[in-house]
Image (spheres, grey):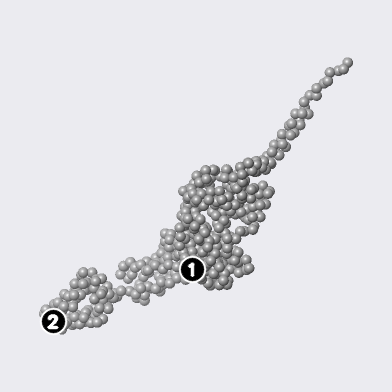
Amino acid sequence: MKHLSTLPVKFLHIEQEFHHGGHGVLDLLFSSPCYGHCLPILRPWLCPSWFWLVQVREKCLRRGYLVWCILVLLSGWLLPRPTLAQEAPETTYSYTFGQSAEFTLRLPPAAEVEEMLLFLCIAGDAPEIHILTVEDGVARYRRDLRAQPFLPFQMVTTWWEYKDDNGAPVKTGETTFLNEDNRFQWQTRTEGDLTIQWVSGSTELLVAALDIARTALEEITTSLHSPSLGPVTIYVYPSLPDLQLALRLSGYEWLGGEALPAVGVILLAIPTTPESLIRLQQDIPHELTHLALYRQLGPQGYANLPCWLNEGLATHFEQRPEALYALALERARRENALLPLADLCPPFYTLGGEQVILAYAESQSVVGYLQQTYGWSGMRVLLDAYADGLDCSSGLKRAVGAELPTVERAWRVWLEQEGYPTEQPQRIWTMGHIALRDLAPWLLLALVIILPGVWFFIAARPTPHLPSSE
Ligand SMILES: [Zn+2]
């Protein structure tokens, strides 16, 4: 029989022995057609008595005490028997994204358990352990996700552990689910590793979104030499308030689209309007760049990237330029109000509304300058330098041989020349012009301080007396 090969030697021996025996009751029992099918089920409670039964059977056959055998067997039915293996407990879960979750274990009817443990593992972290009292055969754990949210779009794994009636430990199988926003009915379209989840919108837009994602991925991974991103899911919310609520429900205060690179998820808010396609062309490549950088540099390297480089690259790969950025950059350049590059190394959270737009615009422009000057190979060296843990200025020093202030001056010259490489004399003239413009306020201040002193000095100087003509 097929299942014999899986039995331990002890059981194999016993089974063969029964099949070579005589015609006793036990032989009838063990040679019945049901025996082969039931053995795996019966084995747990037969095992402890197996050897004893074998010995009884041998005695019966040798001595011919058939009646005695029958009596012994009948008494076996009447005496308390070992407990049958308990049915598996029933485990269930339900949740409403960002609001509540409930996990339940229902014991089989005969089981008597007073306490059990629920293990809750979120996003692969160390499991939380909840000790629960069993009431009427049911253990239940309710969680208020407004107070204790699960991380959004992360996997949640649960299992239960307890001791059965005999004190033997029992562990249920693991249940894993994705904590996705189940407040909406998502439409889904998948192509290879890319999946778009959409609440409302035409099929044409879903197809367009997949096309944009595929083209963007190709360009990003080719330029940065990023490894494959693996499965990526893009959730498109119908409005920004819907997305913001989803993030707030999860304990986050993000304001716009967001990439969750650790789980390959992108969250966007794109209402169905005539501008939807433009928004897709901007937002999908932008967030995919963040995912690619995370995959390429790892969590530590990604966290160490200066914000101007991370956001600058993401904005660089957008397939539709954002007009607001160009306007903000041009105005700041003209008014000599550019943000210092050093202020764009940390995240932009601390910047005000208009400054954030300028921060993105400058980041995009600096990345454009670096890419045009040093090529994608230079950009990859720069990314590696930051992935090694170098700070904002030292990373540039290693990759392009100049510290942050020097690179910033060179970028501003490039910006004055409207992004075109120029001849050396013209560059020197532009640098002098920028330096003069930067120093203008200080020169004015110096004049204000110095001029009264000069005037006083002149006024106080004794007037020379001309000799008398007498
Ligand atoms: Zn971004």
Q: Where is residue 166 in the image (x, y as percent from the top left)?
A: 30, 69
Q: Where is residue 194 in the image (x, y as percent from the top left)?
A: 49, 66
Along the viewing direction, whichever of 467 and 123 lies nearer the viewer: 467
Residue at image position (63%, 56%) is 325
Looking at the image, which residue sits at the far bottom?
A: 67
Q: Mark 2 points at which residue?
A: 65
Q: On the image, which quarter does residue 324 sit in?
A: bottom right
Mark 2 CB within 8 Å of ligand 1: no
Instruction: Judge whether 377 appears above or below 22 on screen.
Output: above
Which structural element holds mark 1? strand
Q: Looking at the image, is mark 1 or mark 2 nearer the viewer?
A: 1
Using a 10 Å C-alpha cutoff, classify the residue at mark 1 as few (fewer than 14 neighbours), some (14 to 19) or many (20 or more).
few
Label 2 is placed on what type of residue?
Tyr
Along the viewing direction, whichever of 268 and 40 lies nearer the viewer: 268
Q: Is residue 130 visible?
A: no
Q: Quadrant of the C terminus?
A: top right
Along the viewing direction, whichever of 56 and 407 lies nearer the viewer: 407
Q: Mark 1 points at which residue?
A: 191
Label 1 is placed on what type of residue?
Glu
Q: Is residue 297 visible?
A: yes
Q: On the image, which quarter does residue 38 sit in?
A: bottom left
